Image (tube, rainbow, N blue to C red):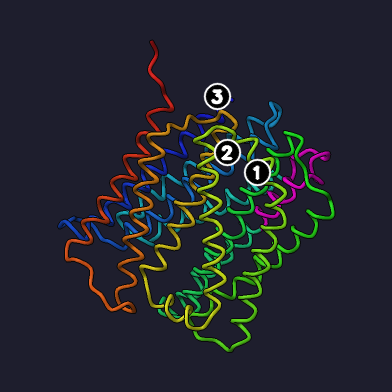
Amino acid sequence: MKPIRLHFRLALVYFLVAALFGLALRGFGVFDLPGKYRFLVHTHSHIALLGWVYLALTTLIYHAFLHSSSIRARYHRLFLFTQLTLLGMLLSFPFHGYAFWSILFSTLFLLASYGYFAFFLSNSRADQRKAPGFRLVRASLIYMVLSSLGPWALGGIMNTLGPESAWYRLAIYFYLHFQYNGWMVLALAGLGLHLAGKRGIGLLPKRFETGFWLLQSGIILSFFLSTLWMEPPGVFYVIGGLGALLQLAGFLYIGSALWVGLRQRFNGWALHRLLVFVLVLFGVKLLLQALSALPAFATLIAGNIDYIIGYLHLTFLGILTPALWLLGKSQRIIRLPVGGTGVFLLGFVLSELLIFLRGSQGWLNFSVPLDFSQWIFYTSLLMVLGILWIITCQWPRSH
């Protein structure tokens, strides 16, 4: 258990680093800071997705399905190689943006993620492979590999069509869509099902099978929502909207049966409230995703950077992050102080309100105060303090 705890703690440290870069990005609107904004954006996003979420998820998956002394050494070698790629990105992106070294380490990270996928398939036990939780996690890893087609395509697109091409933006959206809708959310759902199964809470095979294929269809078809900024033919709106509804139906079909098991697993007052918080925000995310299939909403969102950032933060900070904390806490991998969690969530909620408020000023015909960026900076500071609080509690003082 000690290596598992250490790996998850390291993921939390990456999260703190990503949050500090996010705070610096907010600081550009308040202070005269050195450095290139665009380079820091690349660093922030890569370390948040790959240092925090990827590392935390792969640690939890290893603990749930692969934790065996016979494969521990191979896993540690893969883990150390992954750290090399992450540190390389951390030391190259802030100074050069997308250049030789950052591209090299990003490419090596993709290869490391393929190695993890192969490691998972080759070392999982045969008696696990029909379990609902395992099947969702395996599907999530397939989406992780699929999403990497986006980064691989970027080089060719830049050399032939240029970064201003619509295909360049589509490649990025392809990557993001299958990362958070496919890989990350499905992995969390699979881990949740696995924990419920350990408590004797399962799904009827037919119910799971229906929900599973609703989810797969929904995840694939809802990618078309990421093309609506191009104002494509009407059939794209229909396909994307159908995908969003199928995704919603799949999660409701599985989640309604899973709720009892999750509620029993997270039975402490604070953990139960945090679970409800995550599920409510996940419902909001699915609703916003479905609404984005409507032409009026698609047009409104396409040119609004605050709405896009707010939605991404809703997904990564409001859903994925607390869900990872819940899974880690429920298995005694991390300590989750109520105070630190509360400070982080307060900063997150205030930040979301301010970001969406600023994004709405155009179509609601009002203006935000001149010091609005300063307010958003302070909400980001709250999140940093919350993460720091949580990290310091992982190493309690000896008495």
- Mark 2 = which residue? 327
Q: Which residue is mark 1?
A: 192
Task: Name the element at disc 2.
Answer: helix
Mainly helix, strand or loop, the magenta region?
Answer: helix
Q: Quadrant of the N terminus?
A: top right
Say whether disc 2 or disc 1 marks the residue closer to the N-terminus. Answer: 1
- Mark in front: 2 vs 3: 2
How many neighbours does mark 2 have within 10 angstroms: few (below 14), some (14-19), or many (20 or more)? many
Kindly state the secondary structure of the residue where label 3 is placed. Answer: helix
Marks 2 and 3, how far apart at CA: 16 Å
Q: Secondary structure at mark 1?
A: helix
- Left or right of 174? Residue 336 is left
Given residues 355 and 105, the one toward you in this image is 355
Q: Are marks 2 and 1 in contact (CB under 8 Å)?
A: yes
Q: Earlier in the sequence, mark 1 or mark 3?
A: 3
Distance CA(mark 1)–CA(mark 3): 22 Å
Q: Which numbered dot is residue 2?
A: 3
Judged from this view, the residue extending furthest toward the bottom is: 233
Pinpoint residue 220: horizontal percent, then vertical percent.
Answer: 66, 68
**Mark 1, residues whose alpha carbon is within 10 Å: few (<14), some, or many (≥20)?**
many
Q: What span is in magenta?
A: 121-142
Assess whether residue 357 is covered by the magenta stretch: no
Three-letter residue code for mark 1: Gly
